[in-house]
Image: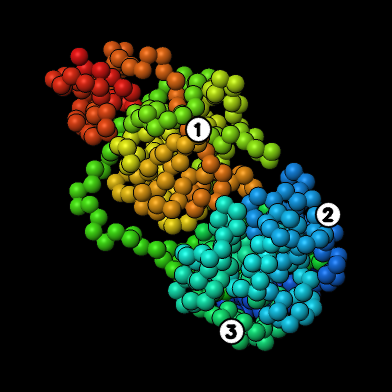
Amino acid sequence: MLRFRKITLVTTMLALVLHAFAQGPNNSGTYYQAATGKKGAALKTALYSIISNHGTISYRELLSYYEKTDKRADGKLWDMYSCTTNYTFRDNAGGYKKEGDCWNREHSVPQSWFNEASPMKSDIVHVVPTDGYVNNRRGNLPFGETQKPTYSSNGGFSKVGPCSTEGYSGTVFEPNDEYKGDFARIYFYMATCYENKISSWSNTAVFAGNKYPAYKSWFIKMLLRWAKQDPVSKKEIDRNNAVYGCQQNRNPFVDYPGLEEYIWGGKQNVAFSYDNYDNSTDPGTDPDPNPDPDPNPDPDPDPNPDPDPNPDPDPNPNGVVFTLVKSETEINAGSYYILVFPGNDKVKSCALSDLTDGKNFYTSADVTIGSDETITTTVDEKGKPHQLLLGGTKGAYTIYDVMGKVYLSQTSNDNKLYTATTASDNKTKWSISVEAGYSHITNNNWTSREIQFNANSPRFACYTGSQKDLMLYRRTVTDGIDTPTTWQPTRVTVYSITGIAVRRNVERSVALTGLPKGIYILNGKKVVVN
């Protein structure tokens, strides 16, 4: 009997220990434990039971709570509708005649849709601070996408116009790409937290009139796509944690990226586990796939148009000097560049650095711009700027990440920056123009998208002109022409100055023998044949 009691005691203690170590994300502990094992609509209902019993903030109290939930790093208010405002938390008084006059409280789900009822009216998860004028232009329009806007906020950041999303043709408000995922996760939260109320909400363009799926098919497909294209950011995680401190509930779609796929998407038959969560995306689950728009691709593309897929730019890359590119004459195949954001009052000057793991954008590394418009920096190390080797020809450049050994690519029409191991189609071709010291790098497949820097969520990605412009800095060489006499013999490919392969996989010692006079690119360096 004593032995049995000891075994029971040990088993009980082990269970307690395992329970103590079983924790959800973002310090949520066992908050979501009751939803474990649930799928699809049942998972949504289980989450409803967890998050719906929250504290109620008064509508007036929201003004003071925003200082906890929506403060930027510089102490100003975080505005998701405008890219040009720098509001203090007291700038919400008075009227507005234009963008930038004052901010107010914006219901992501318009309050007229639920008859201004509580607690939805003051639920801080979906009532966010935004520019008052842009908010007024939205009114109670549904979120959507428009290709022919009738109104655009500063810099085209937010738009109003006829819906271009399949399934709806009415007028919509389109938020910026950088916040589409934020708003999608807010809408998933609202359908879950108010499962017992949403069937009576009034907008028939958006709501399905039931508790599940709660939204119309076109709207769900769009929200799922938005959530995938704009993944959870640190801003959302910080806000979610702050919201919990204000009204004692959380948004599970922020804590568990991709959770919406378990309820509305391609993983409805997968059981949820609060402490062993699989946030991978199954191939083919995108509800709105985006196939290659070119039904007749080049039947014989150049499989390797760049100077060298494995260049060795510098055996001692410490202290490499780069000079600002001021004209397109300084854009040349075979040259090395770093891509730089010159900085503002929020973010220091920085250069494109490491590629994120699975998130499809590049992080930044601080650099110092000298008074002579040069940058001296260590490159091609972890946390340092990546050199970009230009290949191809004008109007169809390829951009090779030397450290990552990949080409920059725009695989899909979204605000990410993808990569490819080969450069054989327009998704890996770029047009580059220079204006007033800024270089505009536009994708040849998605011509409305340009590589830019997001200063609010620091990253280099591909946007529709809504973020910060960039500068190219070209690596400085002493004489402009290198000679191959000291290079070790290996097999190489020789390219013309325009990026056309003239010899492939030949011994370096004879790579230039018999070639006509001119300048060639060998191992990423310019060489002259006399």
- Frontmost residue, 277 versus 145: 145
* Residue density around tag 2, few if under 14, some if 14–19, many if 20 or more, within 10 Å: few
Task: Write the residue at 37% across / 14% down.
Answer: 479
Q: State the separation of the CA atoms marked 1 and 2.
A: 37 Å
Residue 90: image tag: 2
Determine the residue located farthest toward the front in the rendered image: 97
Let me know if residue 224 appears in the view: no
Relative image position of residue 341 (x, y in whole percent): 56, 36
Residue 277: image tag: none
* Residue density around tag 3, few if under 14, some if 14–19, many if 20 or more, within 10 Å: few
Relative image position of residue 433 (x, y in whole percent): 41, 39
Q: Which residue is mark 1?
A: 437
- Frontmost residue, 247 versus 135: 135
Q: Nearer the viewer, mark 2 or mark 3?
A: 2
Q: Quadrant of the C terminus?
A: top left
Left or right, residue 88 beside residue 486: right
Inspect the image, locate mark 3, and give the three-letter code of the amino acid beneath it.
Thr
Left or right, residue 41 beside residue 391: right
Q: Quadrant of the N terminus?
A: bottom right
Inspect the image, locate mark 2, and give the three-letter code of the amino acid beneath it.
Arg
* Residue density around tag 1, few if under 14, some if 14–19, many if 20 or more, within 10 Å: some
Left or right, residue 10 beside residue 228: right
N-terminal of the pair, mark 2 or mark 3, is 2
Q: State the separation of the CA atoms marked 3 and 1.
A: 49 Å
Relative image position of residue 215 (x, y in whole percent): 58, 79
In the structure shown, which secondary structural element does the residue marked by tag 3 occupy? loop
